[in-house]
Amino acid sequence: MSDVNLTPNIDRPDDFYADLLGAHEGLSKEQSDALNARLILVLANHIGDRDVLRGALEAAKL
């Protein structure tokens, strides 16, 4: 897995988790799924490196 950081690396992870849950509040299942898909694409664009993204896909399958 090319340069994928699997070590905890999020500042205040509990706060981020609360933000993530809050973003889904009041959404239908379809809206929540769409939000997740858009978030994945935004973060993938931020990463930008196809090798890292492939590694992340592989890591997510485990």
Image: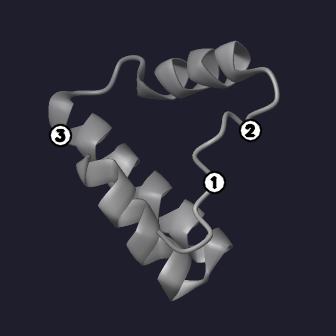
User: Where on the picture, by quarter, is residue 47?
Assistant: bottom right
In three-dimensional space, the C-alpha distance between marks 3 and 1, rounded to whole angstroms, equals 30 Å
Q: Residue at x 67, y 13 (%)?
A: 14
Front-lying residue, 13 or 54? 54
Q: Residue at x 41, y 26 (%)?
A: 24
Front-lying residue, 57 or 15? 57
Q: Which amino acid, by three-letter code, is at mark 1?
A: Asn
Say if 48 sits above or below 57 in the image. Answer: below
Front-lying residue, 9 or 12? 9
Q: Which mark is residue 48?
A: none
- Across and down, in percent, residue 41 comes to 46, 67
Q: Residue furthest right?
A: 11
The residue carrying mark 1 is: 5
User: Where on the picture, by quarter, is residue 49?
Assistant: bottom right
- Across and down, in percent, residue 59 comes to 37, 54
Q: Colour scheme used in the picture?
A: one colour
Q: Earlier along the polypeptide chain: callout 2 or callout 3?
A: 2
Cβ–Cβ under 8 Å for marks 1 and 2: yes
Q: Residue at x 50, y 83 (%)?
A: 51
Dot 3 crowding, Cα within 10 Å, few <14, some 14–19, many 20+: few
In three-dimensional space, the C-alpha distance between marks 2 and 3, rounded to whole angstroms, equals 29 Å
Q: Which amino acid, by three-letter code, is at mark 2?
A: Asn
The residue carrying mark 2 is: 9
- Across and down, in percent, residue 20 comes to 54, 27
- 60 to the left or right of 17: left
Helix or strand or loop: what does disc 1 sit on?
loop
